[in-house]
Every structure is written in structure tokens, then in C-alpha cells.
């Protein structure tokens, strides 16, 4: 017990000694800080007074100059008014013109300075200004009509008038216009140093005195005087005298004046001396307050430290256990999130594996069936049709995954080109018609509501948007059901309009629960009567993101078992020139390549064989090249005009399609710039199309190639080049 008491006594002895040291050190530091702050405040006040005295003088000079300039301008205008109104020199006429011009005084003089007309709305008479407006300088304006004269005339009562003199236009003489300011308002129009100091409280900033020519003209301890010389208290006057005698300009020092110690400074601003002084005793309260706060904090620290020493081991262990639990919870939550992410990835891979293997299995199976029925033409035709359908499904799956990847990474860029909406709607319906027939669904389109068919849009993305919705409308329909695609134009204004695409079906519809998550990636509602439907669950997600990318939106109305209506709203700029021609979008529906000589650059044997077959069947003469370098050599060695068109693959060995196109365009021959060059590539994104145009190509066709689209596109491009 004695040892414990001894340790406790030693502890509190150390606490007391440290407390005394803390009080002394904090007092010294506090006094030094207060002194430094007072010195900085004094320097700031002096600096502010210096800058403001210059600003106030400049402002007052500017006010005076502005008033005189107005007087000169109105004198000139008054001369013009008199010249255009023959009877305007009488008092009534001058009064009317003075009120219109906003001047207070108007005088009209002859060439020798005699008054012939006057007006005044105040006590200023012509005799009060006669000397200034009739001296030689003022009368010079008669001989120099472009010259004016102005001055300010001050009166004994503190009022003044700004006058301007100009030559008369109607006859020799001068016109005088004046702005009078009474004594009651003269001080209000000027910024004074006394006003400047009004915001400085003596208790916070100390005493501030401004002197000019040895006289005090402003002080913050005097509040009932606007301007002029002021009388200081004898004590303050003595402090100012001591500052003059002992302090240097621009420095803040400790000054003993009488029985008090001051923090004082003096500095010069233009024609003024600025003095500031603060009693040191006024700062002691801050020192005591700061020291008290430090002592209180020290006591709190001591108490907290004493309590901390007495904390029980149980409480400390409890805190550690709690931290361990929280850490375990965070680990569990992180593990759950990781498992959810892995589960979603696994489900997606499983679904993609199933959806991709299904059409691949169909393609391989139909090939085996066709081999088994080698002599049955009808069976061969049926197998080819099913292979074509399965390959289309596979292509759609790949496109959806690639589109989603591009959208999520923010790499999708819209390539705005003139696009015919009538063609877009009809093309979507034509593409979906084959699938609809297989499922026993009727698809129709209505584009009668389009007034301006040609708009600036990204044709590829617009088709993809409508196709995704129309495809779902067909897949999730009923045998004997119908799908209707409608496009109407709304709110045309300023070269732009809002277009509304409505895809309505009589299919199986969607449940209310699924509609809440239909825009989640990989979401797909499983229904018994939709077993023929396939896909990644990305179609609606891609459609929504494409609509938002184009500045529009997408909305659904659906009832389970009754059907679904999708409304796509897009704001699109109108190509007025193209829309006014009402281009016939069916002009190339029966396109042919008869008589065309085409150079085909394709490194893949199978793709080259297919393209050569399609082009030859359409009537074209085809010359093949295995890569871009060979295509360049064949074109360069051929006579001018040998080829009508070049069909160029992009990804080729030795020289790719971009490089080959640039090389052909740079050849010094007549047809190098004119011959149409069309890209045929598996690179199907918008940025790929832009790169093709930048390389000098005239068009871009994405693989897999549809033979009808290929022939149609080549015929259009060739015809356009010939024009």
C-alpha cells in the first residue's frame, strides 16, 4: 500500500511540475503570438489605408472628370438643339431643353460674352459663373468650333457647379451647360478617408489616425464627422507625436508613451501619413485566455490518461473481439460478392456455351443429313435452309456479345450519315420475315407517318436497335401471331424531329416481375410456351443503351399472355436536301452487276470462293488476288479502265486493305481516284467504317456477307461513281 501511495504521489508530483512548465511556456508563446498578430494586423491596416487613400483620390478625381465630361457633352448637344429650334433661346425653350438633357443650368452668350438667355433650377446665377465662362480661354471655342471648355466652380458654402462651354452653331456665341451640386450632397458624392476608417473597431484594430500636412483628417475613434480637420484626444495626440519621433516608416514597434506600452506603426500613402497604435494591455486578455485553455486541455489530458490506466483488461479484450467480428463480417461479405460475381460469370458462360453449341450442332447435323441424302435435291435444299438459319442465330449471338462489350467499355461511336428511315424499317422487316415465316408469325411495317425520311443517323446502330426489339417480338410470339413495326414523325422544328418507332406483337408477353429486371444483363424469362426462343439475354439491354446513346429512350408496355408493345423515341436531325427529293428507296431492289469487271482481294480461300461465286452469278467478271500487295500489283499492271470496282478485304497478309487502298489511290493514273473501292471485312464496328473512309474507300460491307445486300450495295456504289 505504501509503495502504491509512493508511486501515486510521484505521478502527481510530475503532473504538477509539468503543469507549471506548461503554464509558463503557453504564456510566453501566447504573448509572442498575440504580439505577432497585432503587428500583422497593424501592417494590414496601414497597407489598406495606403491603397484605399490612392483609390479614393482616384475615384473622386474620376467622379469630377465624369461630371465635367457630361457637362461638355450636353453643352454641345444644347448648341445643336438651339440651332435646330429658332426660338429656343428664351427661358422657356432653355428650360425644356435643360430638362430633356438633365442639366441644372443653361446660359446662352453672344460672341463678346453678353448673356442672351438663361435657365437655372437652383441659386446659381450667371454672375456667379460669369468670370470663368467669359475669360479668353472659354471664348476661344467661338473661333474653334470643334473645341470645348469645361471647369468646376466651387462656392464658399461648399457647393460647386461643373460647367461646359461650346460654340453656338446658329450664330457666333457660346452655350454653357452646368451640373450643380449643393453642399448637402457634395460630401455624399465623394469617398472620404473618414468613411474608409468607419469599419475599423478600436477594440479590435486599435486607434488609426490619418494626417495630411500635419493635420489629422481621419480617425477611427471619431464617428460623427464626415471630412475635414479633426481634433484628437490629448492622449492620442501625444501618442501620434511620439510615433513621429521614435518610429520608422513601414515598421511596427513597441512604443512607450506616457505610462502605457503600445504596438505602433507609421507609413506614408501619397500625401497622407497613417498612424496605428494598440495598447499592449488590450492584448493581455488574449494571453490569459489562451493560457487558461491550454491548462484546461492539459487537465483533461491528465484525467483521460489516469482513466486510461485504470481501464480493465476485460474492456480491452472486448474491443479486440469486436474488431475481429467486424473484420470477419467484412471478409464474409467480400467472399459473398466474389461468389455472386463468379456465379454470374459461370451462368453466362453456361448459357453462352449452350446457345452457341446449339446452332453449331444444327449446322454440323444438317451437313451429315445432307451427306446421307446426297441424291435428294429437296432434302438438300431443306438442309441448306436450316444451316442458313442456324448460322444466322450464331451470328446474332456473337454480335450481341460484341455489342455489349463495346457499349460497356464506352467505345461505341456514332457515325452520323444520311440515312433513309423508310429503307431502314423495310430492311428490318425483310430480314425478320424469314424467321417470322418459320415460326408462323406475320410481320408488317407501316412507314406512312414519315414526312422527312432522310435523317442524320448511324445506320448500323439504328438497324441494330430496331432489329433487337423486332427479333424478340418474333421469337417470343405465338403460332399465328403478328408483329407490326410502325415509324411516325413528331414535333418537327428547327431542322430536327422526334421519330417514334413502335414494335407491337401479339406474343406471350412478360410478367410484371420480369419487367422490373428486363434491362439487367443476361436476364431472360423462362416460359413454357417460349421453348423455341434463344439468345444471350442482352438484346433489350443493348437496345436501351443504343437508344440512350442516340439521345432517346425506350419504353415497354406488356401483359402476360396478351403481347408486348415497345416504343422507341429518338430525336434526329433531318437532311432537308435529301428529304426534299423523296428518293426512291426501291430503285436498286433489282440490282445487277452485269458487265462489271471486279477485282476481288481476299486471303481466305473459302471466303474468296463464296464471294467469287456470288459476284459471277450476278453477272460480274471477277479477278482474284490473295492479298493487298497482289491486288495493288494486278491493278497497277492492268490497263486504265480494266476494272470497274475493287472489293477489298481488310485483314490480309503482306499488305492489309487500308494500306492497299491508300497505295492504289496514290497511283499516277486516271482511274486511281475514280474507281470504287469497297471494304469487305469481319471488322463491323463504326470505327472500322470510319477508318475505311479515311483510307479512301467508298463503302463498307460486314461479314458474314448477305449475297443480296452485297450485289445491291455494289450496284449502288458503282452507279453513284459513274454519275
Image (cartoon, rainbow, N blue to C red):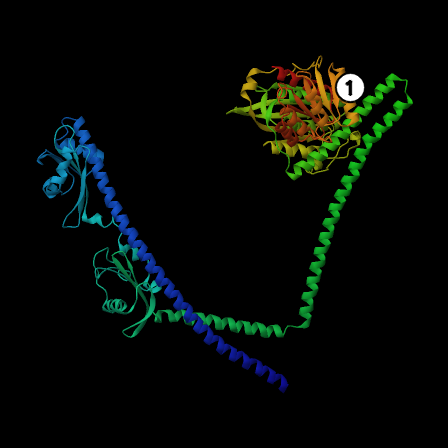
Residue 691: image x %, image y %?
A: 64, 30
Q: Which of the 4 quarters of the picture holds residue 169?
A: top left
Above or below residue 95? Residue 372 is above
Residue 569: image x %, image y %?
A: 60, 28
Query: Is residue 163 visible to us here?
Result: no
Residue positioned 49% across, 75% down in the render: 22
Query: Is residue 257 visible to us here?
Result: yes
Is residue 145 found left or right of 372 in the rendered image? left
Above or below residue 667? Residue 193 is below
Residue 460: image x %, image y %?
A: 65, 27
Above or below residue 213? Residue 145 is above
Q: Which residue is mark 1?
A: 613
Q: Quadrant of the N terminus?
A: bottom right
Is residue 723 found left or right of 239 in the rendered image? right
Residue positioned 23% across, 42% down in the render: 67
Q: Which of the 4 quarters of the picture holds residue 199?
A: bottom left
Amino acid at each position: 500500500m505504501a509503495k502504491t501511495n509512493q508511486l501515486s504521489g510521484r505521478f502527481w508530483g510530475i503532473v504538477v511540475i509539468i503543469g507549471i512548465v506548461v503554464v509558463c511556456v503557453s504564456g510566453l508563446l501566447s504573448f509572442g503570438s498575440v504580439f505577432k498578430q497585432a503587428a500583422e494586423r497593424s501592417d494590414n491596416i496601414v497597407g489598406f489605408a495606403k491603397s484605399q487613400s490612392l483609390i479614393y483620390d482616384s475615384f473622386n478625381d474620376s467622379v469630377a472628370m465624369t461630371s465635367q465630361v457630361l457637362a461638355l457633352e450636353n453643352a454641345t448637344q444644347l448648341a445643336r438643339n438651339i440651332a435646330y429650334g429658332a426660338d429656343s433661346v428664351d427661358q422657356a425653350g432653355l428650360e425644356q431643353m435643360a430638362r430633356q438633357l438633365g442639366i441644372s443650368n443653361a446660359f446662352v452668350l453672344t460672341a463678346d460674352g453678353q448673356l442672351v438667355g438663361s435657365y437655372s433650377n437652383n441659386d446659381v446665377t450667371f454672375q456667379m459663373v460669369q468670370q470663368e465662362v467669359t475669360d479668353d480661354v472659354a471664348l476661344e471655342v467661338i473661333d474653334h468650333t470643334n473645341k470645348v471648355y469645361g471647369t468646376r466652380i466651387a462656392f464658399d458654402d461648399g457647393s460647386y457647379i461643373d460647367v461646359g462651354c461650346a460654340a453656338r452653331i446658329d450664330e457666333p456665341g457660346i452655350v454653357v451647360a452646368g451640373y450643380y451640386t449643393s453642399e448637402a450632397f457634395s460630401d455624399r458624392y465623394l469617398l472620404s478617408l473618414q468613411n474608409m476608417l468607419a469599419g475599423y473597431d478600436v477594440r479590435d484594430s486599435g486607434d488609426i489616425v490619418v494626417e495630411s500636412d500635419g493635420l489629422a483628417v481621419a480617425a477611427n475613434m471619431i464617428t460623427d464627422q464626415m471630412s475635414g480637420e479633426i481634433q484628437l484626444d490629448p492622449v492620442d495626440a501625444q501618442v501620434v507625436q511620439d510615433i513621429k519621433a521614435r518610429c520608422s516608416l513601414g515598421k511596427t514597434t513597441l512604443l512607450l508613451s506616457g505610462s502605457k506600452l503600445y504596438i505602433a506603426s507609421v507609413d506614408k500613402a501619397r500625401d497622407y501619413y497613417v498612424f496605428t497604435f494598440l495598447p499592449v494591455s488590450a492584448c493581455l486578455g488574449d494571453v490569459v485566455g489562451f493560457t487558461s485553455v491550454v491548462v484546461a486541455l492539459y487537465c483533461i489530458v491528465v484525467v483521460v490518461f489516469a482513466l486510461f490506466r485504470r481501464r480493465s483488461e476485460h474492456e480491452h479484450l472486448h474491443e479486440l473481439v469486436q474488431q475481429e467480428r467486424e473484420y470477419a463480417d467484412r471478409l464474409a461479405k467480400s467472399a459473398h460478392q466474389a461468389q455472386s460475381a463468379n456465379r454470374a460469370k459461370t451462368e453466362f458462360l453456361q448459357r453462352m456455351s449452350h446457345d452457341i453449341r446449339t446452332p453449331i450442332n444444327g449446322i454440323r447435323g444438317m451437313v451429315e443429313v445432307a451427306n446421307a441424302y446426297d441424291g435428294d435435291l429437296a432434302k438438300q435444299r431443306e438442309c441448306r435452309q436450316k444451316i442458313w438459319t442456324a448460322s444466322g442465330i450464331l451470328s446474332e449471338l456473337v454480335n450481341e456479345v460484341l455489342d455489349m462489350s463495346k457499349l460497356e467499355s464506352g467505345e461505341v461511336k456514332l457515325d452520323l450519315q444520311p440515312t433513309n428511315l423508310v429503307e431502314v424499317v423495310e430492311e428490318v422487316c425483310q430480314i425478320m420475315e424469314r424467321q417470322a415465316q418459320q415460326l408462323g408469325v406475320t410481320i408488317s411495317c407501316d412507314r406512312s407517318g414519315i414526312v422527312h425520311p432522310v435523317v442524320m443517323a448511324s445506320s448500323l446502330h439504328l438497324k441494330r436497335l430496331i432489329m433487337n426489339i423486332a427479333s424478340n417480338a418474333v421469337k417470343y410470339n405465338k403460332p399465328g401471331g403478328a408483329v407490326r413495326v410502325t415509324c411516325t414523325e413528331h414535333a418537327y422544328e428547327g431542322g430536327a424531329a422526334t421519330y417514334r418507332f413502335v414494335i407491337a406483337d401479339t406474343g406471350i408477353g412478360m410478367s410484371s416481375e420480369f419487367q422490373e429486371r428486363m434491362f439487367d444483363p443476361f436476364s431472360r424469362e423462362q416460359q413454357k410456351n417460349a421453348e423455341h426462343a434463344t439468345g444471350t439475354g442482352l438484346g433489350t439491354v443493348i437496345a436501351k443503351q443504343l437508344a440512350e446513346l442516340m439521345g432517346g429512350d425506350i419504353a415497354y408496355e406488356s401483359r402476360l399472355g396478351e403481347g408486348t408493345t415497345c416504343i422507341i423515341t429518338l430525336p434526329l436531325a433531318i437532311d432537308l436536301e435529301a428529304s426534299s427529293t423523296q428518293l426512291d428507296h426501291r430503285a436498286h431492289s433489282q440490282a445487277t452487276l452485269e458487265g462489271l469487271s471486279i477485282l476481288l482481294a481476299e486471303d481466305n480461300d473459302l471466303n474468296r470462293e463464296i464471294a467469287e461465286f456470288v459476284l459471277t452469278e450476278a453477272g460480274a467478271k471477277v479477278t482474284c488476288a490473295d492479298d493487298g500487295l497482289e491486288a495493288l500489283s494486278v491493278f497497277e499492271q492492268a490497263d486504265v479502265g480494266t476494272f470497274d470496282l475493287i472489293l477489298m478485304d481488310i485483314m490480309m497478309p503482306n499488305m492489309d486493305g487500308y494500306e492497299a487502298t491508300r497505295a492504289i489511290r496514290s497511283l499516277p493514273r486516271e482511274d486511281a481516284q475514280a474507281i470504287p473501292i469497297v471494304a469487305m471485312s469481319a471488322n463491323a464496328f463504326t470505327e472500322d467504317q470510319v477508318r475505311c473512309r479515311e483510307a479512301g474507300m467508298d463503302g463498307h460491307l460486314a461479314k458474314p456477307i448477305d449475297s443480296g445486300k452485297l450485289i445491291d450495295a455494289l450496284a449502288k456504289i458503282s452507279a453513284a461513281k459513274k454519275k
